Image (cartoon, grey):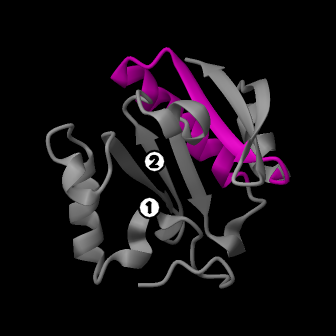
């Protein structure tokens, strides 16, 4: 399965979709990631829940967003944050990231997360716009492996 961001129909990131041999296998990994007891089986140290953004008008998968249940982890607490998302390249600029993040804040509230850390690359203006539109307050810019990353906090 391919998550090459160069294709208009595929996703960047994909939460290991590019490593799965089938959709069923990938969904199984997503289920394992939801529990503290089983997330380690997927090579992930922190439990998370994956959500799909499906456009109702044509049942098209337009995006994927992940919510990490906590960020008590050196990488997540520094630059990984509570969630990551991707929007199909051909669907970018339509407000999907903004809406996905808005809905994910409700999921965070259910988990008891009071303050959500979210990051984006400094040159990703679209992601930054979605974060700010959802109440993101700039914290600072950090450099990770030569890449500038902006940190934002959102009060839930």
Q: Circle 1 — which element? A: helix
Question: Which label's residue is closer to the chain start, 2 or 1?
Answer: 1
Q: How many marks?
A: 2
Residue beneath the point at 27% across and 65% down: 27
First to last magenta residue range: 95-124
Q: Is residue 154 magenta?
A: no
Residue beneath the point at 21% across and 37% down: 36
Q: Circle 2 — which element? A: strand
Q: Badge 2 is on which residue?
A: 66
Residue beneath the point at 31% across and 43% down: 45
Q: Which mark is residue 15?
A: 1
As drawn, the residue found furthest toward the front would be: 145
* Residue 104 screen position, x and y as percent: 50, 37
* Residue 83 screen position, x and y as percent: 52, 41
Q: Quadrant of the C terminus?
A: top right
128 or 143, which is in the foreground? 143
Q: Is residue 111 magenta?
A: yes
Residue beneath the point at 30% across and 40% down: 47
**Disc 2 to disc 1: CB gap under 8 Å:** yes
Q: Is residue 116 above or below residue 79?
A: above
């Amino acid at each position: 399965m391919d998550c090459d961001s160069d294709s208009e129909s595929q996703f960047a990131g994909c939460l290991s979709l590019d490593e799965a041999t089938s959709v069923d296998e990938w969904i199984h990994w997503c289920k394992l990631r939801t529990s503290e007891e089983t997330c380690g089986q997927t090579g992930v140290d922190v439990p998370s829940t994956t959500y799909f953004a499906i456009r109702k008008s044509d049942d098209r998968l337009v995006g994927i967003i992940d919510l990490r249940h906590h960020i008590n982890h050196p990488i997540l607490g520094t630059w990984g944050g509570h969630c990551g998302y991707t929007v199909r390249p051909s669907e970018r600029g339509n407000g999907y990231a903004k809406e996905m993040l808005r809905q994910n804040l409700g999921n965070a509230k259910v988990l008891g997360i009071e303050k959500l850390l979210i990051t984006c690359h400094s040159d990703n203006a679209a992601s930054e716009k979605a974060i700010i539109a959802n109440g993101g307050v700039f914290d600072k810019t950090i450099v990770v492996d030569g890449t500038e990353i902006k940190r934002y906090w959102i009060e839930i």
